Amino acid sequence: MLQFRITRLSFLLVALTYFGASAAHADDACRKVRAAYDVGTSSIKLSAKLIDVCKSEVIKDIYSGGKVTSTFAAQLAAATIDRPQALDLEYWEKNGLPTFEAAKKFVTEEVAKIKDENGNSYAIDQHAGIATHVFRTCSNCAPLLKSLLTNERTSGLDIRIIPQAREGELEFAGVVRSLRPGTDPTKISSWGIGDGSQQFVALAESKAGVQKQLYYLSSYASGTFKTALVEKLGRTENSPNPISNETNLRTNKSDYTVASELVDALFDQAVAKNKSASFVDWMTTTHPIVYGVGGVHTGAIKGALKLDKLLKSDDLGAFYLITDLEAILTKFLGLKDGEIVEKMNAKDFDGKTDEEKEKLRKNEKLLSYARGQVSSMILVYRTALKLDIDRVYLSNADGTGEIYFMPEFAPKAEPAEKVGSVEKPAPKPTLPTKAELCSRFVVKNASKFGLSARSAAGAIAAMGTIERANGTVSGCIVQKSISAKGCEALGMISDATTCYGVVDIPANTSGTRQMMVYIPLK
C-alpha cells in the first residue's frame, strides 16, 4: 500500500516536470471541461477547467471560487475514524442529496456564463470530486455518494471519498505544480489544515538516492481542535473564547497554557498513532521549505498578520514568520468573540453607528470565524514549534486543483465487440463484492503476512465485525497477524493490538475501492 502511494506521487511529480502549465493546441477529442468538487467538512468548493485529458494539461482556467455550504459535519459530529457513524437516510434525502444537486446546478450555470474564443458558452463534460474528513467518519456515505452518479437529480456527479494520506498527497502535488520549474520536491513539505484534518506530506531522499514519502496525519484541525479545547476549558457554548493568559481558578493554569499543552499532547498522540517519528526527525534536521495550504494559513493567519503588516515576501512568495505569529497571537488573547469580529473586520466598522457596530458583532457568519480564530493560531504556533518551523510560505494551491489529474477520473475507453457488421460496446464488468475485495487485499499483500498468494486466499480474511476499545467496528477482518513493520509497509496504522486503516483495493477496470481493514498485531 505504501509502495503504491510512493509510486503514485512519484508519477504525479514526473508528470508535473514533463508537462507545461498550458497547451497551445489540443485534439478536440482530448479537450474536456471538468468541474471539480472539493467536499469538505462544512462546504463544497467548486471550480472548472478546460483540460487536455490525453496529456494531463490545463488548457484554460474557466471558473473558480464557487462554494456551497453543507451541514454534514453537524450530522456526524460524534463520529470518528475509529468509530464511524451512519448518516441518517432521511437527512440525506432532505438535505444531503439537495446539497449536491445545488452544487452541480450552481457550477453548471456559472460555467455556462463564460464564453470560449468563438463566443460559445462552455459546457461541462465531467463532474468529479473528492470528499474528505467528515465522510471518512461515515460508515454509509460511500454508497450514498456513489448513487449520485445515477440519480436523475445529480446524474454524472462522481464523488470519491479519499484517505487522509491521499488528501495530503494531492495537496503536496498541488504545491509542486504551483512552484517554478526545476524546484526540488525533496526540499519542501506541504502543511494542509482544514476544518477536520491536518496533514504534512514530504518526499524525502536518502543518501542512496531512494525517495520515500513521509507523513504527519492528525484529525485535529481548525474545527476539531476548537471543539476539543471548548471541552477542555469547560466552556458551556461552542466557543473557547476568551482565551486568557491569566491563571484560571478551575485549572490553576491560564487558558493559553491549557490550549498549548493540548496541542502538544495531541501532536505527540498523532505521531505515535501514525508512526510519524521519521517525519518529525526529517523536519527537524533538514528544515525544508514549508508551504501552508488551506484557509487556516491563507485566511485566519494571513488576515491576523496583515493587521500589523507582518506578512512578508521574498522570491519564493508571501510568507509569515512564527515569531510574528507569536507576537500577533498575544494581542488576541483575552478577546471575546465579538471583539475578535471587530478586530478582524476593522474596516467594516469604520463610520458605523453604535447600533450598526453591535449588529456586526453579532453577525453569525463573522462569529463562526471568530470562534476558531485564536484556537487556530495556537494550533499552528505550537505545531510549528514541535517541528522547528521558523516560517511558512502561503500556497494558493490545494488538493482541489489535482482533481483534474487524478487517474481515478481519467476517461476509460470501452472495448467494442462486433456483432455481425455492427459494433456495440462490450458489457461492463461486474464489480467485485466486498468479500471478494477483502480476499483480494490479502492475496495482493501475501508476502507481508509471510504467505504465498495461493495460501492467502479467502480462508484467512472475511467481512465481519470485531470488538475494539471504543465499540464494535465492521470491515475486512484478517485472521493472520502481521508485524508492526508489515503494518507500516501497508501504509496503515497500529495500536497495541491491531493494525488498521482505510485501503485502496483494485476493483477490475473500475479503478479502486476503499475498505476499512483490521489485522491483529503480532
Image (cartoon, rainbow, N blue to C red):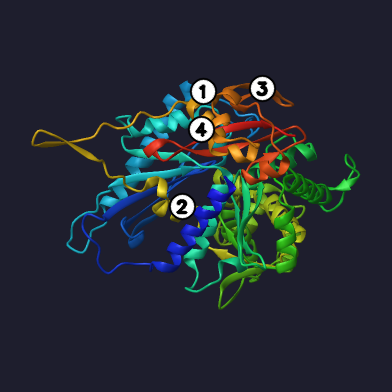
Depth check, mark 1 against mark 3: the one in front is 3
Q: Secondary structure at mark 4?
A: helix
Spatial distance from mark 1 to mark 4, Cα to Cα? 31 Å
Question: Could you tell me residue 522's position as x and y percent?
Answer: 75, 34
Contact? badges 1 and 3 (CB < 8 Å)? no
Spatial distance from mark 2 to mark 3, Cα to Cα? 35 Å
Q: Which circle marks residue 466 in the picture?
A: 3
Q: Is residue 457 above or below residue 47?
A: above
Question: Could you tell me residue 292's position as x and y percent?
Answer: 60, 60
Q: Residues within 10 Å of mark 3 (few under 14, many from 20)?
A: few
Depth check: 361 or 1 in front? 1
Depth check, mark 4 against mark 2: the one in front is 4
Q: Residues within 10 Å of mark 2 (few under 14, many from 20)?
A: many
Tell me: 259 left or right of 4: right
* Amino acid under disc 2: Thr
Which residue carries the number 2 mark? 400
Depth check: 155 or 295 in front? 155
Which residue carries the number 1 mark? 88
Q: Residues within 10 Å of mark 4 (few under 14, many from 20)?
A: many
Residue 348 lies in what quarter of the image?
bottom right
Q: Secondary structure at mark 3?
A: strand
* Amino acid under disc 4: Arg
Q: Secondary structure at mark 2?
A: helix
Spatial distance from mark 4 to mark 2, Cα to Cα? 30 Å
